[in-house]
Amino acid sequence: MRIKDILNPESMIMSLKATNKEEAINEMADLEVATGVVNDKDEFVKSIWAREKQSTTGIGEGIAMPHARNKSINKARVLFAKSDQGIDFDSLDGQPVHLFFMITAPDGADNTHLQALAKLSGLLVNPDLIAKLKAATKPEEIIDIFTAAEDAKDAEEKAAAEKAAAKKAEEAKEDKSDKPLIVGVTACINGIAHTYMAEQALIKAGEKLGAEVRIETNGSEGVKHELTADEIKHAKGVIIASDKKVKMARFDGKELIAGPVVDGINKPEELVKDILAGKGSVYHDSGNSEEASEAKASGLHAVYQQLMNGISHMLPFVIGGGILMAISFLVEQYMGGAKTEAFVFLNNAGSMAFAFMVPVLAAYIAEAIGDAPALMPGFVGGFMATVYKGSFGGAYVASVNHSANSAAGFLGGIAAGFIAGYIVVGLKKLFKGLPKSVEGMKPMLIYPILSLLLTALVMFFIINPIFGALNAGITAFLNHLGTGNLVLLTAILAGMMSIDMGGPFNKAAYVFASGAFANDPNSKTAAILMAAVMVGGMVAPFATAIASAFFKNKFTDEERKAGITNWILGFSFITEGAIPFAAADPSRVIPSSVIGSAVASALVGLLHVGVPAPHGGFWVSPLATNIPGYFLAVIIGSIVAAVILGFWKKPVNK
């Protein structure tokens, strides 16, 4: 079966209306139902989200491949969809997704369907193919593009097979010692897309780096290209790019690098280089000859993912609660004071959301580490970080701090999440050998009691006293900053907002400011820091909008259209609007935006512009302590960035 047999013009959306991940999945699912591919939308969407929770299918480079295989699916099909503006799909590289491939496979799908899906997945590592798909305007063009790519791929594989046969015939005569052999296994949970994309990416990386790479795929159609004992014996090292268990005993004594399947897709050259440089660890079989634990992200990347899991769940509480509280202050000032019913209602609603912010942060950091059993102790640990003494509901009085006069706050909540998560991981290992007859006791009795007890002990006697003092010190430092130091700090925070426009630097700056704001929403300095990151995040989209409007010969037609949209995105504090420009020309767009953001936020610090709201852009400008200064800072910073970018960029025809 060929790829064109699982593509169909009726299953294509050439311009998605969706603006976020949930809307995109639902819009594509609606078409799947309308075309008879899916018979139960709710069941299908549920399975798509279940896969997304395992790991995002936004694989980077503007591509997402949501997929499912279950009884709600009638036929194997690939739905193709395009989004001109791009959609935040929680992609691994943090970039918006423009091309979607929703892959469906019924429970009874035969191997011919699965082979076609595997071939399609392998083709998507080709940047030329992606560029053609982005430029296509009609469904028929999509099919023609894939047909041509498949023909070329088949011809390439045929030539490679013939070359391999000839090479094998002369193998006895050749000295192959100068070309190292690397073997590996790729596998993902569903085994439909990521498995084969990682395989192709690793093989291509090996060709580029002068190594022979042979990959065993463990996909939905079973194990393919199974490694032989001779191949493993002569291999310099092993690469495992897998999200599920694979046979590991055969690699005993070999140098090995293991990671999630997305590593095989996103950094294949790094993996191959590390094996060639001898940076892997020698694998020793532990006695379980059949399987290894799931590969997960490790090191700093794992910590970042766990922290982001907490922050992503926390942000709605910060934004919703913070803006309602800020509106209540307007009501207090202009509509009757602190005793009006409107003020009391809005302020209480916002305060309630804020009260859950740190506990939710800690709970979902813990959940990312220790799964569902860690959620409860993480939540309680986060709550313990928010107060040091308190009465709750008038009925309960609790002392949750051994010796401090300040709550551990935002930083204590982060610590609580990691502590609770790793306590649960330790408990799982400790009770791993329990008899199967008492397995049910672990989630219902052992984990809840011991994880809560241990987390509470650590928080009460260690974390709260230490972080309470640290939190009090940071708050005092920020509240006593002089104008000069405040200007410097705001400029640094705003510059970070534009370095990666939604990535780790951007998130770090926003978390710092929102953490200060969460610790003390009434702090003038915290409001200035929030204004700084807000202004810093608005400059990049505004700058690209201005530059594309006034330096038209420096931008393509598509970029000028995107620039028009960025007027609205900049107004709303959506930095991601500048990402397409930064992706196309990072060496000019990013430095220009960083300079403009730093200038704008230096003005925020100089003019003491405060915005007591964690989001909203110019929509929340009435809340600013210096409204003209707020607008002035954004306008000047955006013009500075736009002028630098406009003069720096080369005309598109050169």
Image (spheres, rainbow, N blue to C red):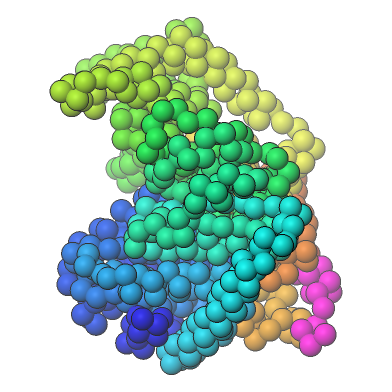
Residue, x 56% and y 57% (percent of image)?
214
**What span is colored magenta in the figure?**
641-654
Where residue 166 sits: x, y (%)?
Answer: 63, 73
Identify which residue, 635 or 170, lies in the foreground. Answer: 170
Residue, x 70% and y 78% (percent of image)?
548
Q: Where on the picture, by quarter, is residue 108?
A: bottom left
Where residue 439 sits: x, y (%)?
Answer: 20, 25
Q: Is residue 11 left or right of residue 200?
A: left
Identify which residue, 151 or 44, lies in the foreground. Answer: 151
Q: Where on the picture, by quarter, is residue 158?
A: bottom right
Where residue 238 sits: x, y (%)?
Answer: 58, 45
Pick the quarter of the image with the N terminus: bottom left
Q: Is residue 185 left or right of residue 290?
A: right
Residue extending farthest to the top is 403
448 in relation to 560, above or below: above
Marker count (numbered): 0
**Magenta includes 651?**
yes
**Magenta includes 374?**
no
Where residue 449 sits: x, y (%)?
Answer: 27, 17
